[in-house]
Amino acid sequence: MELNKRQQQIIDIVKHNGPITGEHIADRLDLTRATLRPDLAILTMSGILEARPRVGYYYTNKSQNKIIADELKKYHVREYASHPIIIKNGMSIYDAICTIFMEDVSTLFIINEKGDFVGVCSRKDLLRASMMGEDIHTTPVDIIMTRMPNLSYISMDDKVIYAAQLMIEKEIDSLPIVQQKENGNLEIKGRISKTTITKLFVSLFKE
């Protein structure tokens, strides 16, 4: 959020004189209370200022980055889950390559015959296999996939900020969203990607 000159002046006044009423802020700026009302509303809704009845406005000491970070902590993965592209572990590398490009995704999530989440395969994995002379038409994808315990995943109840941190840490483009089955194995319920999280970040800055 970009503040205008008047809003910045209001913040400076409240910083040094708060708590202070709207009328006193208006007097210092030689403006009417009605003129300031929209600016005060923006500053309080954004969390930079807080207002107390019969007391006035005071500065929260939160930077805009801190406010955005606090806002991000409110969002959960379930609100931004998208459809996962899932293949069986017996699919050939060739068919996996066709799938990843037809679906226009960066990562395929792999399950076994029982529907358990068992692996992940990225574009880089498939490219590497095709360049190393593998018989991509007959070799199953589970030969080259990443498998437990090296898989990263999240649940629907995890926060979006945690998903973002995990993707940065692991240097991956998306994460499977899983749910534990009765037998203790994992079932894929969705996915969340860097693109989805980036769109959320941009929307918060726009707001």
Image (tube, rainbow, N blue to C red):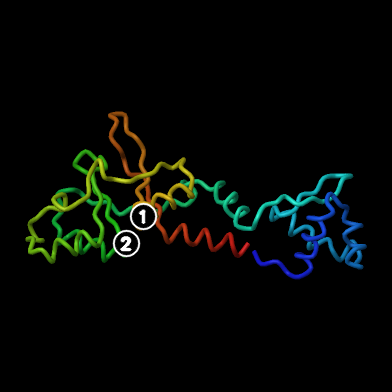
Apparent side of residue 65 relative to residue 123 in the rendered image (left or right): right
Q: Nearer the viewer, residue 115 or 130?
A: 130
Residue 14 appears at what percent x and percent y? 81, 56
Q: In what element is the residue under mark 1?
A: strand
**Mark 2 crowdedness (10 Å alpha carbons): few <14, some 14-19, many ≥20:** some
Residue 174 appears at what percent x and percent y? 36, 55
Residue 158 appears at what percent x and percent y? 46, 42
The residue wearing badge 1 is 174
* Mark positioned earlier in the residue sequence (1 or 2): 2
The alpha-carbon separation of the residues under discs 1 and 2 comes to 9 Å
Q: Nearer the viewer, residue 60 or 110?
A: 60
Kind of residue indicated by mark 1 = Ser
Q: Is residue 6 above or below residue 180?
A: below
Residue at the image position 76 percent from the left and 70 percent from the top: 5
| Mark number, residue 96 | none
**Mark 1 crowdedness (10 Å alpha carbons): few <14, some 14-19, many ≥20:** many
Residue 55 found in image quarter: top right
Residue 21 appears at what percent x and percent y? 88, 53
Task: Give yes or no for contact between labels 1 and 2 (Cβ–Cβ under 8 Å).
Answer: yes
Determine the residue located farthest toward the front in the rendered image.
16
Kind of residue indicated by mark 2 = Val
Residue at the image position 28 percent from the left and 34 percent from the top: 185
- Of tags 1 and 2, the one toward the viewer is 1
Residue at the image position 39 percent from the left and 55 percent from the top: 168
Determine the residue located farthest toward the bottom in the rendered image.
5
The residue wearing badge 2 is 105
Apparent side of residue 204 relative to residue 108 in the rendered image (left or right): right
Determine the residue located farthest toward the top in the rendered image.
182
Q: In what element is the residue under mark 2?
A: loop
Q: Is residue 94 above or below residue 178?
A: below
